[in-house]
Image: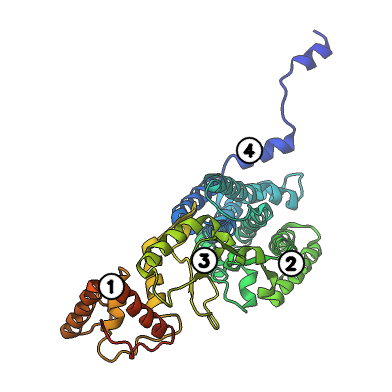
Amino acid sequence: MSATATLTSAPRTLPAAPRVHRTELLRGSGVWAGAVLAVTVIVAVLARRYSLFDTWATTQAALREAGLLLGGPLALTAGCLQGGRERRRGTGDLLASAARSPLRRALTAALPSVAWPVLGYLAATAVCLGVLLPYASYGHPAWHLAAVDAVALGSLGALGFAAGRAVPWRFSPPLVGVAGYVLLGAGVSGYPGRGTAWLSPANGGWGRFGDVPVWWAGALCVVWTAGLAVAALLAGHARRRALAVLPLLAAVAAGSVLYRTGDDLLRSDSSATALVCDRGTPAVCVRATHAGALPAVRAVVTRIDSRLAGAPGAPVRYREGGTGGAIPPGEVRFELYGGVFRGRLGDPETLYRDFVFAVTMPFGCEGSSDPAGHPAEYAAQEWLGLGRPLSADTAGRERQAESAARRLRALAPAERRAWLGRYLVAARGCDTSGVPAP
């Protein structure tokens, strides 16, 4: 048999380096960390889909919070466990005699700690965005933010690996994971004005309603997190450890800009807060993010308007947002706190009660000024379908209120409209003491 035939019949094998990388990727704690991270993020995000996700901004904010706050400590723990593997197995001296440099060996060993959290998060992001694709009513997915979060998770895995190599103690992984949870959690609330919050990859300020990050904020976060990870690996394993200064300086520079800029990293999204109105009477206006819920809000307004038809002083406009400052006469301000999902209100009954209170006791009034136990106020609220008197603090006052409500129902339509008109005008001035109960 010729040499050519022998070479041809020999089995094909992968080059040494890819074979080693594949072996590292398919074993160890990284695989489990990626799988657990993906499942955790999917469950945490989709469990709140009915009450939260009416825009892509809020959806991705929830993905960031679940992925970084829950997945970040997991990546740190798995990386630290991977980093201390050589000391636990007693193979440090054997690997030190290999031909490869310490940095190349470290990068190969750290590959699962970096790759699997990233792959797990990206898989979870794809699943969540795919499930919610038919439902989100405003905006579009910002794929670059998912990439920023993935880089942060990979960097946390690398930092955990470096910590495991530096301190190969059996209790290092859980301690590193707990410390990571505490540090990452400092940025979840995203308190305004706190620059330190923006140093946390899990900062919840990115998903604040009506705001979007400036285009270069994501690049700064990548340099901040990846720079720290690269510096840690170079400092622990490079032959010229002074090279770690370069990525460290880049990370410090990016972190300084994040810290000093703080909430100015966000700009107002005027298109999200713009009003969308229908052509009905009274007019109903909601934010563009809730445009799909406009028919549902109109249905709630119609229920109230049908009870106030023809009454002088009835509202002529219902507007979402802007509850601060002076409110024009005849306008009712509200917020859709119940959430919107696929154009449906999360809690239409709560919105109805809010409208009743806004009409009978407008925003800014501390309460009715009627000294007789609020019978007039309750009569108006009961006519609008609110229910039992909330302000009657004794049985006698409750009977007075219920009696006033019965008399209002018994009035002729013209007399009832006239009384309601007098009450609504007085309520707008926050003083109903001059309006006698029916």
Quadrant location, the C terminus: bottom left
Which residue is label 2 attached to?
A: 251
- Which labelled disc corresponds to residue 23? 4
Name the amino acid type tagged 4: Thr
Q: Position of residue 337 (x, y in %)?
A: 46, 66
Q: Position of residue 437 (x, y in %)?
A: 26, 84
State the image quarter where residue 211 is shown.
bottom right
Q: CA distance from mark 4 to mark 2?
A: 32 Å
Name the amino acid type tagged 3: Ala
Q: CA distance from mark 2 to mark 1?
A: 62 Å
Q: Secondary structure at mark 1?
A: helix
Name the amino acid type tagged 2: Ala
* Earlier sequence position, callout 2 versus callout 3: 2
Say left or right for 197 vs 231: left
Which residue is label 1 attached to?
A: 382
Name the amino acid type tagged 1: Glu
Q: CA distance from mark 3 to mark 1?
A: 24 Å
Say left or right for 66 vs 417: right
Please tell me how crowded label 1 is: few (under 14), some (14-19), or many (20+) other residues with Cα within 10 Å. Answer: many
Q: Secondary structure at mark 4?
A: helix
Nearer to us of marks 2 and 1 is 1
Please tell me how crowded label 2 is: few (under 14), some (14-19), or many (20+) other residues with Cα within 10 Å. Answer: many
* Earlier sequence position, callout 3 versus callout 1: 3
Q: Secondary structure at mark 3?
A: strand
Instruction: Name the foreground residue: 245 vs 115.
Output: 115
Q: CA distance from mark 2 to mark 3?
A: 52 Å
Which residue is label 3 attached to?
A: 283
